[in-house]
């Protein structure tokens, strides 16, 4: 009996994975149908910012971030995970598409659609990160990531926080629409400056460092940099705090979703000034 139950659970998990993968493939095909710009547009903002700040850092401080990491790699390890986090969260907050042909399948729930979109975004930004790491490794003729397994888990963890935050905001935002607009604005404008993208945490004075370290993305970004070079200094950064946010945000999001799933069937996605993001 226990063996049969375990087999049924595995079958259901496999079916769930297939459904989420199908949603991700469908979303990828929709992007591809828009032409090259539809696929490449997601890269434009992070790549433009990496290029801009690379030029500024070279002009102001010289060619290197320091002795710890290649400057291009250091910037990529900040901008790419952050924009992945923000895009996953904002896509989740935007809700689910109604009336698409895929959604006539009764087995598909709104959560499956949200998970499929998150999976695609993580895959896209993961590919971008892999290209940066491969190019810099080829340039320096060595593997620039000393702990690739740790780096992969941290990268995915940052995406999961985005999904948890977006899922929670989506549900509560149906009851309080202004909250969804505030969170969208907060993700792109305020959180950007406290995620250790433009500066390493070690450069923050001790008295101001706690105002940065409340942000789990700052922990994730600096831990990612440590996965490339364990000697990279990151005072105050905690893997325990980061993973507590991963588990907590997903847990809270799923708990709220499970008690309010009917809202997503009854209500269309909320309009807002940042829907174009």
Image: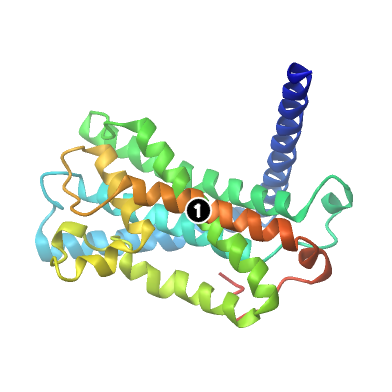
**Left or right: where does residue 115 sit relative to residue 203?**
right
**Left or right: where does residue 105 sit relative to residue 193?**
right
Q: Residue at x 53, y 73 (%)?
A: 184
Q: Nearer the viewer, residue 177 or 252?
A: 252
The N terminus sits in image quarter: top right
Q: Is residue 97 above or below residue 69?
A: below
Q: Residue at x 30, y 31 (%)?
A: 147
Image location (x, y in percent) of residue 90: 57, 65
Image location (x, y in percent) of residue 79: 36, 57
Image location (x, y in percent) of residue 2: 74, 20
Image location (x, y in percent) of residue 87: 53, 60
What is the basis of the colouring in this image? rainbow
Q: Residue at x 75, y 55 (%)?
A: 110
Q: Is residue 183 above or below residue 81?
A: below
Q: Which residue is mark 1?
A: 248
Residue 163 in view of the camera: no
């Amino acid at each position: 009996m226990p063996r049969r139950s375990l087999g049924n659970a595995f079958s259901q998990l496999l079916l769930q994975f297939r459904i989420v993968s199908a949603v991700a493939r469908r979303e990828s095909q929709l992007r591809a149908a828009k032409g090259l710009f539809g696929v490449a547009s997601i890269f434009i903002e992070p790549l433009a910012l990496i290029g801009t700040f690379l030029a500024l850092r070279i002009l102001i401080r010289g060619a290197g971030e320091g002795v710890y990491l290649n400057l291009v790699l250091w910037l990529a390890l900040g901008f790419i995970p952050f924009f992945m986090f923000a895009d996953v969260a904002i896509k989740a907050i935007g809700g689910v598409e109604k009336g698409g042909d895929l959604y006539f399948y009764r087995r598909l729930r709104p959560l499956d659609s949200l998970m499929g979109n998150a999976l695609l975004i993580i895959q896209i930004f993961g590919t971008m990160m892999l290209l940066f790491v491969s190019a810099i490794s080829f340039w320096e003729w060595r593997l620039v990531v000393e702990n690739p397994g740790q780096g992969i888990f941290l990268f995915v963890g940052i995406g999961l926080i985005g999904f948890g935050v977006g899922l929670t905001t989506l549900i509560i935002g149906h009851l309080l629409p202004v909250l969804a607009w505030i969170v969208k604005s907060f993700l792109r404008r305020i959180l950007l400056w406290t995620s250790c993208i433009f500066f390493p945490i070690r450069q923050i004075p001790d008295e101001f460092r706690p105002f940065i370290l409340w942000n789990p993305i700052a922990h994730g970004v600096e831990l990612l940099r440590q996965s490339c070079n364990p000697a990279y200094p990151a005072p105050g950064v905690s893997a325990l705090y980061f993973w507590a946010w991963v588990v907590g945000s997903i847990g809270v999001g799923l708990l709220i979703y499970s008690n309010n799933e009917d809202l997503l069937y009854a209500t269309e996605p909320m309009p807002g000034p940042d829907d174009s993001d």
